[in-house]
Image (cartoon, rainbow, N blue to C red):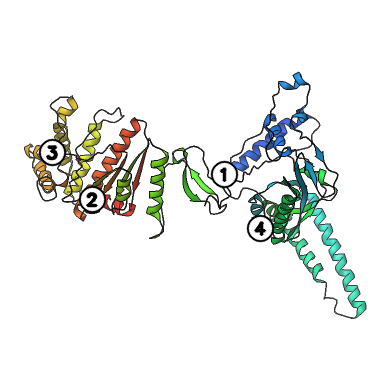
Amino acid sequence: QIARSNNGIERSKYITFGLPAEGIAEARPRLERVEADVTGNLKRLGVPSEALDGQARLALLHGQMHPGNREPFRFSWQDIPKTGLGTKDYIAPDSFDFRQSRLFRVGQYWGAASYLQILASELSDKLLAEILELDAELTVTMHVQTVDQLKAIKTVKGKISDIGKMKVEEQRKAVRAGYDPDILPPDLITFSKDAAELLADLQSRNERMFLLTFTVVNLAPTRQRLENDIFTVGGIAQKYNCALKRLDWQQEQGFVSSLALGYNEVEIQRGMTTSSTAIFIPFMTRELRMAGPSLYYGMNALSHNVIMADRKKLKSANGLYLGSTGSGKSFAAKRELLNVFLTIPQDRIIIVDPMGEYAPLVRRLGGQVIEIAPGSPSHINPMDIQLDLDDDESPLSMKADFLLSLCELVVGGKDGLQPIEKTVIDRCVRLIYRDAALGLDTAKVPLLQDLYEELLKQPEPEARRVATALELYCTGSLNLFNHPTNVDLTARVVCIVLKGLGENLRKIAMHITNDFVTSAVNVNFHSGISTWCYFDEFHRARRSVA
């Protein structure tokens, strides 16, 4: 995909705007207002932009006059008074040669300036997109000049009057020749209809009139490569009912017009309305190719460029893989997981795998696979707690909240836990964690059975009701979570497999798993480590904890 993409092509887009003024003092505030409008409009389009200062504009002109980027740009404002050189001396190439009628030379490169003859009544935005996707060094320039609205309407009305006069003359010829005067030449009918539509657009549809000059300057190291590039651009133009015409004996004017100076020395203009001119807005797609430890995420559907992104630098690092069955969701997640493992060695990876699809990959990576199922030797103790975290919230309060929700899930019912039951559970949680909270050496990590036994010691009948509900998961046949943790939860890659669980245990297992993931993310965050969490079959996980 990288070989088929256009990532080797670097596209730069510049807007140069100008206005008539008596001097720079008058022009500066007006230009600043125009700059604010242009920047604001581009921002509404979702296009980031920045203004070029003097040195950046010189660097741009130096790049245009030194094709191939062989000559480095060396410039400093302090050098001008020392050397006596002007800014042009820093950007000028070794030589210009405009002696030929259809070609010119800039240094060692060959060049040709052409203009686009727009013949089509309707254009597609694919025209500019295809030209910009060419693997060639070229400059596409559009000089757009506004026409006063009243003057444009007056001009179109004049054209309609001329067409009406031509209609009358054709009808007179028809009467003299003895045939039906309503039969008019097809071109005249078409021109009349187009002119009427244009007048309606200008008067009632908030359209403006613009004069457009569209030039293309191709540059290549050899003359044969140049001719091939021009032929390719001409083929694209012809496909969209346009023609690429060489600027004979105007190569110098065409080259100067292509520079980012706002000068237009090519006096070939095409009248366009607002809608027609907007076709040439060059912001068709937004590329996502970030530097640094970025990962591959596929190809842009419009530009066919590779998408490389670092999710940590995006507005939201979260993501979803959506698609139909068999479309490759799990495969895409595994590929990203593998890229993270190989590219970012300090990050941790946690996978919640309801169907056991990731376990073989995690074993190959040397990670910890935890199979939670009846009869499995792997155990996670839901009573584990990290008391040494410097967090805004108390770890003991967070653990009490988790155990309250776990008991509510176990007790079930329409109303869940009653206020007295919540109070009793909170009291018991604080009692069983008292030694650990005090930092005593004799403190040990409690089990779920310790909470069960502490509930039985309480005098309230509500405590016995909760303890009876917990009995199945402590001393009963589903005592899967009543064991000390015997797996490495600190491994770099951890995969929790829930495939062997029945419906009764799955809800509790998902709840305990979510608590483990949250705790691991908090611990890693305090250590300055990023955590990549993958929840496969998200719809099943959501149904289990709903």
Residue 172 versus residue 377 in the image, above or below: below
- Asked if residue 425 lies left or right of residue 162, the reply is left
Instruction: In the rendered structure, find residue 449 and report the number of the disc placed on it.
Output: none
| Residue sticking out furthest to the bottom | 178
Closer to the camera in the image, 40 or 492 = 492
Q: Examine the rendering and report whether any part of residue 265 can be seen.
A: no
Closer to the camera in the image, 305 or 71 = 71
x and y, in percent, of residue 326 in the image = 38, 60
Mark 4: which secondary structure?
loop
Name which of mark 2 and mark 3 comes first in the sequence.
Answer: 3
x and y, in percent, of residue 240 in the image = 69, 60
x and y, in percent, of residue 365 in the image = 33, 44
Residue 184 versus residue 488 in the image, above or below: below
Q: Which residues are magenta?
A: 371-394
| Residue sticking out furthest to the top | 82
Q: Which residue is mark 4?
A: 124
Q: Which residue is mark 1?
A: 46
Q: Examine the rendering and report whether any part of residue 250 can be seen.
A: yes
Instruction: In the rendered structure, find residue 451 and report the number of the disc placed on it.
Output: 3
